[in-house]
Image (cartoon, rainbow, N blue to C red):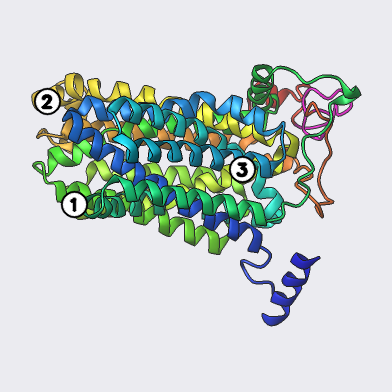
Amino acid sequence: MADSARSLDDTAQNGGKPGRFTGMGPFMLVWSGQAVSLVGNSVLRFAFVFETWSATGRATALTTLSLCAMLPQVLLSPLAGAFVDRVRRRTALQLADGGGLLVVALLSVLHFTGGLNTWEVYAAVMLLGGAAAFQFPALGAAVPLLVDKDRLQRANSLLASAKSTADVGGPALGGLLVAFSGLGLILVADLVSFALALAAVRVVRLRGDTGPAKRPGGGPRKKLVAEAVEGMRFLFRYPSLRDLMLAFCVVNLVMVFGFAAVQPMVLARSGGQTAALASVNTAIGVGGVAGGLLMAAWSGPKNRARGMMLGIIGMCLSAQVAMALAGGVIGWCAAILVGAALMPMINGVMQAIVQTKVEQEWHGRVFGAVVFLSQISVPVATAVSGPLADHVFEPQAAAGTGVFVVLGPLVGDGPGSGMAAMLLIAGLCGVAVGVLSMTRRTVREIDTLLPDVDAGPGDTDAGTATDDGSGRPGDPEDPENPDNPDNPESKELVEGRP
C-alpha cells in the first residue's frame, strides 16, 4: 500500500503523468547498494593486480589472477542459479553479498595479522568469483519483484550502468588508495560496501517473494546438478528463446575474440603509448555509463528482439569494424564509445526478455544458464586470440600474404595491423549473425510467438505455468496447445524457415 500511495502521489505532482522512475524506489535502493559494492570490488581487484605484480613481476601471474576470478563465476553459475530457485530471492541476494563480505573479512584478518601471501590472494579471488556466481541469477530473479514489467528494461540498464561505473571509477579510485593508504583501507572500504548492499536488501520489500513453488504432488526435489541442467533445457525448449540465446552466444564469442585484440592493437599501432590505451579504456567506461543512463531514461525499444539485434549490429560496426579501420586515438575512442554505449541496451533487453518470458520460479536456473552459455566463450576466445595474433595475423600482415591480400589496403601492414584485421573479421561476423537472426521469425516475433508470463503481483495479462515449466502458451512440448506457433507441429518453425 505504501508503494502504491507513493506512486499515486508522484503521478499527481507531475500533472497526472507518471514519471519515468515512478514506483522504482525499492529497486533504486537495492541498485544503490549493489553499485557501491561493485565499485568496492573493482577497487579491491585493482589493488590485487598491483600487489600481485609487485610480488611477482610476471604477466602470467596477472593472467592467472584473472582466470581465478572468471572461471568460478562461469562454471558455478548453473548450480548457483538452481540454488537461487530453492530459496527466497531476498535470501539469495543476501547470500551473494554475505559470501563476499565473509571472504573480504577473512582477507582483512590475514592482512592485519601478518600480511597476505600470493596464493592466499588467488584463493580469495576464486571465492569472490564463486560468490559473484550467485549475484547475477539472484539479481535477475529479484528485479521483476521490485519493478513493474514496463520498467524492467530501464532497471536492467541501470544495473549495467552501475557495472560500467565500477569499471571506470574502480581502477582510478584504487590507484589513489593504493598510493596513499595501501591495501588495508581498501579492504575496510570493501567490507563497508558489502555491508551497505546487505542493508539495502534487508530493508526493501520484494513483492511476491514467497519462496520456491512446491513441486507437483509434493514430491522431493531433484538433485542440484539435475536442476541446473533443467535451466539449460528450458532455454532450448522454446524455439524463440533458443534461437535468441544461440545468436547472443555466437555474437559474444566473436565479440570477445575481437575485443581481446583491442588493447594490444592500440599499444602496437600507437607505438606503445600508455596514454592512448588509457584513453580507449576510459571511452569504454564512459560509453557504458552514458548508454545505461540513456537507456534508463528511454526504457528501451518497443520491439525488443529487433532492437537488440539492431544494437548488436551497431555495436559490431562501431566498436569493431570502425575501430579496426580508424587511424588514431580520436577515432578509436569515438568508435568504441558508441559500441560501449549500445552494450547496456543489448544486455538490458536480453534480461528483460528472459524476465518476462520465463516463469518466476525458473528465473534462477535460466539466468544461471544464460551466464554459463554466454561467458564460457570468454576464456576460450581469449586463449585463442593471442596465439593467432602473434603467429598468424601479425606475420601475414607484415608479409602481405593470406587474407591481407584483400585486407591489406584497409588495415595496413604495420605493427598492430594483424590484430586490426582480427577485429574487423570479428565485427563482420557479428553483423552477419545479427542480420541472420533478424530474418528468423522465432527471434523477430518473439513477443507474439511466446507471450509474457505472470511477472509478479498485479500482472494479469500473462500466461500461467506449472512447476515444470510446461502448460503455457508457446510451449512446443504442451500437447494441449497444437495451434501454438512455437509448437513443433508448425512446420515452418521446426524446419527453421522464416
Amino acid at dot 1: Val
Point out residue 299 in the picture as x, y percentages from the top left corner: 58, 59
- Magenta stretch in the rendered image: 470-485
Amino acid at dot 3: Leu
Query: What residue appears at the point 62 percent right and 51 percent down from the top-left corner?
Result: 201
Q: Nearer the viewer, residue 186 or 448?
A: 186
Compute the Cα span from label 3 to label 1.
41 Å
Count of picture labels: 3
Where disc 2 sits, the SS reads: loop
Please give the residue where the numbered disc 1 appears in the rendered image: 329
Please give the residue where the numbered disc 3 appears in the rendered image: 93
Task: Please say if 169 is above or below 413.
Answer: below
Amino acid at dot 2: Gly
Where disc 1 sits, the SS reads: helix
Q: Mark 1 or mark 2: which comes first in sequence?
A: 1
In the rendered image, residue 471 lying in the magenta stretch gets the answer yes
The residue carrying pointer 3 sits among few (fewer than 14), some (14 to 19) or many (20 or more) residues within 10 Å by Cα, namely many
